[in-house]
Image (spheres, rainbow, N blue to C red):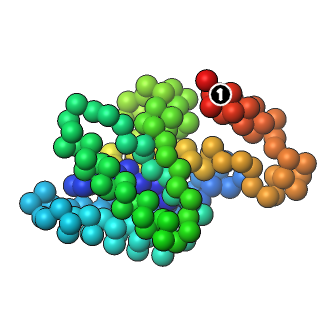
Amino acid sequence: MLGVDPGLTRCGVGVVDVSPDRRAVLVHVSVVRTPPEMALEERVLRIGQGIAALLDEHRPAAVALERVFAQHNVRTVMGTAQASGVAMLVAAQRGLSVGLHTPSEVKAAVTGYGSADKKQVATMVARVLGLDSPPTPADASDALALAICHAWRQPAAAPSAALGGLTPAQRAWAEAEKASRRR
């Protein structure tokens, strides 16, 4: 699973392998950086190339992105949306599905609390992945949190299905997900 925390200056990218029992292992984490003075089209190109290289190297099953949400700073929203669009494009070019998650969905999935702060998310990412310390900068940690969230929200993989379907915990999670979409 590849997680992308989109941004024009710093675009966090993280790859995790998640087993059917929800154990997650860090595969790769980095930040694609572009200088603010670089032409916008060059920045977008560099981000696209960085994500494409990771997709080609690690071949994740899907891509998870932070859902762009309204902020007071239109410039920030535009940069985030532009980086998101590039990530969606390179994923679609490889036939990969893209999952969009709000910050509170990611926080709730990783920490159990939808209003967790960045430090709490980073600490839980480190704990889930068995790391000695949280990945830095926050963009890297957020990308891993997105990947973990998306993987945990997917239906059980084939080995679980072969054993009679979802576990009770997975069924409860799936039912809660279904109920939240009806609201």
- What type is the residue that disc 1 sits on? Arg
Write the residue at 34% across / 72% down.
49
Q: Is residue 42 above or below residue 104?
A: below
Write the residue at 24% across / 55% down.
8
Near-viewer residue (103 or 26): 103
Q: Is residue 82 left or right of residue 107?
A: left
Q: Secondary structure at mark 1?
A: helix
Which image quarter holds the N terminus? bottom right
Q: Is residue 94 above or below residue 64?
A: below
Tell me where residue 90 appears, x and y as whole percent. 43, 67
Asked which quadrant contains residue 48, the reply is: bottom left
Write the residue at 41% across / 54% down.
4
Asked which quadrant contains residue 31, the reply is: bottom left
Tell me where residue 168 appears, x and y as whole percent. 81, 35
Tag 1 residue: 182
Q: Is residue 168 left or right of residue 121?
A: right
Q: Is residue 121 above or below residue 179?
A: below
